[in-house]
Image: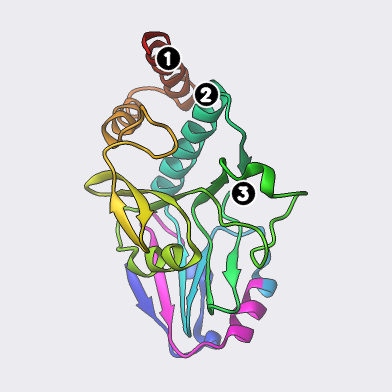
Amino acid sequence: MVATATSIDDLHIDDLQGKVTQKIVLQNVSWQTYQALLADMGDHRASRLTYDQGTLEIKMPSNLHEIINRLLARMVTTLTEELGLNLKDYGSTTLDREDLEKGVEPDSCFYIQNADQVQGMNSDTATDPPPDLAIEVDITSASTRRMRVYKQLGIPEVWRYTKKGLTISQLENGEYVECEFSPTFAMVSPAVIAQFLQLRETTDDNAVIRALRTWLREQISQA
């Protein structure tokens, strides 16, 4: 569900929270106002902000949205553990570039290939490379604007979950192209991820992750 407001003063973030992911979109918002809003809202919040050259989008995820996001994030973590890959999990950290007048807060994002390029507890979007993989959950609304910002920031791989299921996209020549397999995890396809997401309907999160580990170790032993 998408709502509109005429100004920042019209925002009522608490009204957006519910069983369905909702968004509010504001036009003609300055970069300075966007930065001030980020500071005022702080880090301990459920909402996600996206800024694209004057357009501000505020998304309030639903419970289902967060369940899927967290489980996908755990899958990424598990895959890196089992494959012996480096990982720095930055969650829904704000990724913004003043020079591009663009900013976004992924549902989850990770440094994997470039994990050693990010030092300390915080990343600097002005100097550090972008995260290697981002997760975007869009059950009830399109993510056209957010995907456009991901593209401009140069995030190489995006896992996007919609009503139609999961897609994995890779940035090629400035555009996202859907992939049969993950560029980061060569044996992982959208169909494989969907299989474990479906398992969550009849069991708990830990059981899903244990099943993923078992499957992955079988794939490695057969390789």
Which residue is label 2 attached to?
Answer: 83
Which residue is label 3 attached to?
Answer: 90
Please say if 6 is above or below 185: below
Q: Which mark is residue 45?
A: none
Q: How far apart are marks 1 and 3 (CA)?
A: 27 Å
Q: Where is residue 120 in the image (x, y as percent from the top left)?
A: 78, 49
Structural crowding at the residue carrying mark 1, measured as other residues with C-alpha within 10 Å and reported as few (<14), some (14–19) or many (≥20)? few
Q: Residue furthest front?
A: 173
Q: Nearer the viewer, mark 2 or mark 3?
A: 2
Is label 1 in contact with label 2 (beta carbons under 8 Å)? yes
Look at the image and say whether residue 37 sits in the magenta stretch: yes
Give amino acid for label 3: Tyr
Is label 2 in contact with label 3 (beta carbons under 8 Å)? no
Q: What element carries label 3?
A: loop
> Residue 8 lies in what quarter of the image?
bottom right
Q: How far apart are marks 2 and 3 (CA)?
A: 20 Å
Q: Which of marks 2 and 3 is nearer the N terminus?
A: 2
Which residue is rendered at x = 60% and y = 57% of the image?
A: 129
Q: Position of residue 164 (x, y in %)?
A: 21, 47
Q: Which of marks 1 and 2 is nearer the N terminus?
A: 2
Q: Residue furthest left?
A: 164
Q: Which of 159 and 220 is in front in this view?
A: 220
Which residue is label 1 attached to?
Answer: 220
Please say if 16 is above or below 191: below
Q: Where is residue 29 in the image (x, y as percent from the top left)?
A: 52, 87
Give amino acid for label 2: Leu
Q: Nearer the viewer, mark 1 or mark 3?
A: 1
Q: How far apart are marks 1 and 2 (CA)?
A: 9 Å
For the record, the magenta segment spans 16-38
Q: Is mark 2 on a helix, strand or loop?
A: helix
Which residue is rendered at x = 51% and y = 76% of the image?
A: 12
Give amino acid for label 1: Ile
